[in-house]
Image: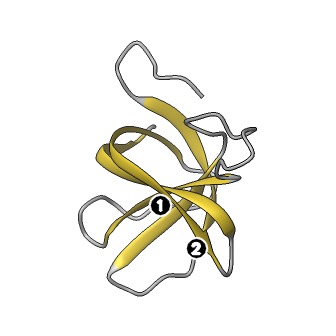
């Protein structure tokens, strides 16, 4: 996945992760960085506090800018990248 001419990544929500109610976590189709490297995340997830952006659902098309990212090894989803958005919009 590459940044578009508008400065946003464009993708689709492919799963919703069950997290504590004060957060939202959505798996996206594709990767923002090289996922083939041995230590790279196998999945990418948009992560933010509830109420900052609108609720999303599987199949929603979104665009976002990145504030920061971090890779963690989670018990339920394995090696995954959290993407903390600087901006997030649902595309219509």
- In the image, residue 57 sits, relative to residue 20, either above or below, namely above
Q: Which residue is drawn at 34% across and 47% down?
A: 68
In this picture, residue 47 sits left or right of residue 80: left
In this picture, residue 80 sits left or right of residue 22: right
Q: Are marks 2 and 1 in contact (CB under 8 Å)?
A: no
Q: Which residue lies furthest to the top in this view?
A: 5
Residue position for label 1: 56
Q: How many labels does the image show?
A: 2
Name the secondary structure under disc 1. loop
| Quarter assignment of residue 63 | top left
- In the image, residue 53 sits, relative to residue 24, either above or below, namely above
Earlier sequence position, callout 2 versus callout 1: 2
Which of the colour schemes (rainbow, by chain, secondary structure, one colour) is used? secondary structure
Q: Which residue is drawn at 58% across and 73% down?
A: 17
Residue position for label 2: 17
- In the image, residue 18 sits, relative to residue 57, either above or below, namely below
Q: How far apart are marks 2 and 1 (CA)?
A: 11 Å
Q: Where does the C terminus fall, quadrant-wise?
A: top left
**Residue 76: image x %, image y %?**
68, 79
**Residue 1: image x %, image y %?**
60, 28
């Amino acid at each position: 996945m590459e940044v578009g001419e508008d400065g946003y990544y464009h993708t689709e929500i492919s799963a919703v992760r069950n997290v504590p109610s004060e957060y939202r976590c959505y798996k996206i189709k594709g990767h923002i960085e090289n996922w083939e490297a041995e230590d790279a995340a196998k999945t990418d997830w948009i992560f933010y506090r509830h109420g900052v952006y609108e609720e999303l659902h599987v199949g929603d098309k979104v665009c976002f800018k990145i504030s920061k990212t971090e890779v963690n090894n989670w018990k339920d989803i394995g090696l995954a990248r959290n993407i903390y958005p600087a901006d997030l919009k649902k595309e219509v």
